[in-house]
Amino acid sequence: MDLRESINNQTDVSFMLAKHIFSKEVKGDTNLVLSPLSIQIVLGLIAAGCKGPTQDQLLCFLKSKSIDELNSLYSHLVNIVFVDGSSSGGPRLSVANGVWIDQTLPLKPSFKQVVDNVYKAALESVDFQNKVSPFL
């Protein structure tokens, strides 16, 4: 993986996302906050959990040659940029990402490992069939 090329590709995707969203959502005197990196990380998480044509399309959109290349890039970014990964005193960002999967679906251990180790995200199997009792 050429890190510079991968980062340039992700920058291109960020600008494309921002341009598209701002052109559709910003009207008049409105404000919009957008984190292309967060969107890309979520799409990377989804790509890590799928296969076949769905994964191919996500990799194409994210301008990545393979899931291993994408995971390697995001692992590198997470370890450098995020608060829990940066020890160099550089930029510090706090991001909370998580994956919630219906408890009736099987979960591959390799996906859990990628979510934990690459994306530093939470992964939970939850009950989407039954309503949760109100807390208050």
Image (cartoon, rainbow, N blue to C red):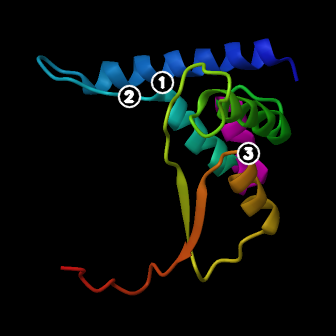
Task: Please tell me the numbered disc located at residue 17.
Answer: 1
Name the element at disc 2: loop
Q: Going from the N terminus, do you reach mark 2 or mark 3 first? A: 2
| Nearer mark to the viewer, of 1 and 2 | 2
- Residue 133: horizontal and vertical position, in percent? 28, 86
Residue placed at 80% from the left, 35% from the top?
Answer: 72
**What residue is pinned by disc 2?**
34
Give the vertical position of 34 relative to 134 (above or below).
above
Q: Main secondary structure of the magenta part?
A: helix
Mark 3, other Cα within 10 Å: few <14 / some 14–19 / many ≥20: many
**Segment tinted magenta in the rendering:** 48-61
**What residue is pinned by disc 3?**
118
| Nearer mark to the viewer, of 3 and 1 | 3
Give the vertical position of 5 relative to 106 (above or below).
above
Q: Nearer the viewer, residue 75 or 108?
A: 75
What distance separates the C-alpha of mark 3 from that of mark 1?
23 Å
Q: Please name the amino acid that badge 3 sits on.
A: Val
